Image (cartoon, helix red, strand yellow):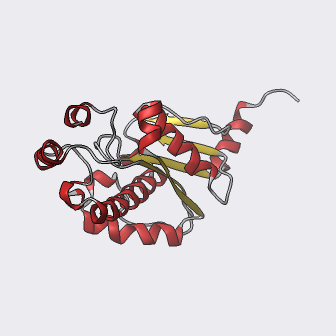
């Protein structure tokens, strides 16, 4: 049968689309998270956007709506140890791969925010600033962010001296000051410069 580009386009357009995004590449502590979401076109969710452009309250309101309305969703992580061993980019791609492969429904097309796609064996495309362009990626960015924030609140209970509840591990002035005072904890990324300086 001869190659049919129109048939291929129709197949892609009719395929289930999975959006993928991450949260937590920049922090000095905690894992990096990733989410994969296949939205249900018959159940649109108003207000989806890049999680960084939404307030925490809005993200917390949208996250359960996404989980309830989506055809499938999954959140996965790459640990601090994996970040230090692989580097943050490769650890992020690993978390993304885990999220996609954890979906209950197999997507026909994976759209990933950024420049790189994880190796999933599925048709994939990277989209720069995709979290503001593709609803499924926006949904993934919200789930990745809210899941990681919740985890950092748990780590705050274990390590209150670092103030994770306030900054979620990002390199704020207060976090750097806490690192200098207390040194690095087991959940800090030892491969990151400010953490190395604090050891």
Q: Is residue 33 left or right of residue 54?
A: right
Relative to 7, say whether 139 is above or below.
below
How far across and how far down the image is residue 28, in percent? 28, 42
Residue 164 occupies which quadrant of the picture?
bottom left
Identify the residue at horizontal 63%, vertical 46% (top origin). Answer: 13
Q: Nearer the viewer, residue 48 or 175?
A: 175
| Quadrant of the drawing holding the N terminus | top right
Relative to 148, say whether 64 is above or below.
below
How far across and how far down the image is residue 33, in percent? 43, 50
Residue 113 visible in image: no
| Quadrant of the drawing holding the C terminus | top left
Identify the residue at horizontal 34%, vertical 40% (top origin). Answer: 189
Q: Is residue 82 left or right of residue 187?
A: right
Q: Is residue 98 left or right of residue 92?
A: right
How far across and how far down the image is residue 77, in percent? 48, 50
Query: Farthest right residue?
Result: 1
Q: Nearer the viewer, residue 77 or 140?
A: 77
Q: Nearer the viewer, residue 85 or 91?
A: 85
Relative to 70, say whether 140 is above or below.
above
How many discs appear?
A: 0
Query: Farthest top residue?
Result: 2
Residue 128 occupies which quadrant of the picture?
top left
How far across and how far down the image is residue 110, in percent? 58, 43
């Amino acid at each position: 049968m001869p190659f049919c580009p129109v048939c291929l386009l129709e197949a892609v357009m009719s395929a289930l689309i999975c959006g993928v995004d991450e949260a937590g590449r920049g922090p000095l502590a905690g894992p990096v998270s990733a989410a994969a979401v296949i939205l249900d076109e018959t159940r649109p969710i108003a207000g989806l956007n890049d999680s960084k452009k939404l307030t925490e309250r809005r993200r917390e309101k949208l996250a359960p709506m996404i989980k309830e309305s989506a055809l499938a969703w999954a959140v996965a992580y790459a640990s601090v140890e994996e970040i230090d061993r692989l580097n943050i980019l490769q650890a992020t791609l690993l978390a993304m791969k885990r999220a996609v492969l954890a979906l209950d429904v197999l997507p026909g097309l994976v759209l990933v925010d950024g420049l790189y796609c994880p190796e999933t064996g599925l048709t994939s495309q990277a989209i720069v600033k995709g979290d503001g362009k593709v609803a499924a990626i926006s949904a993934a960015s919200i789930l990745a962010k809210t899941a990681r924030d919740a985890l950092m609140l748990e780590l705050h209970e274990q390590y209150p001296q670092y103030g994770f509840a306030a900054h979620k591990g990002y390199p704020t002035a207060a976090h750097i000051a806490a690192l200098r005072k207390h040194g690095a904890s087991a959940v800090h990324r030892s491969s990151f410069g400010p953490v190395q300086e604090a050891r």
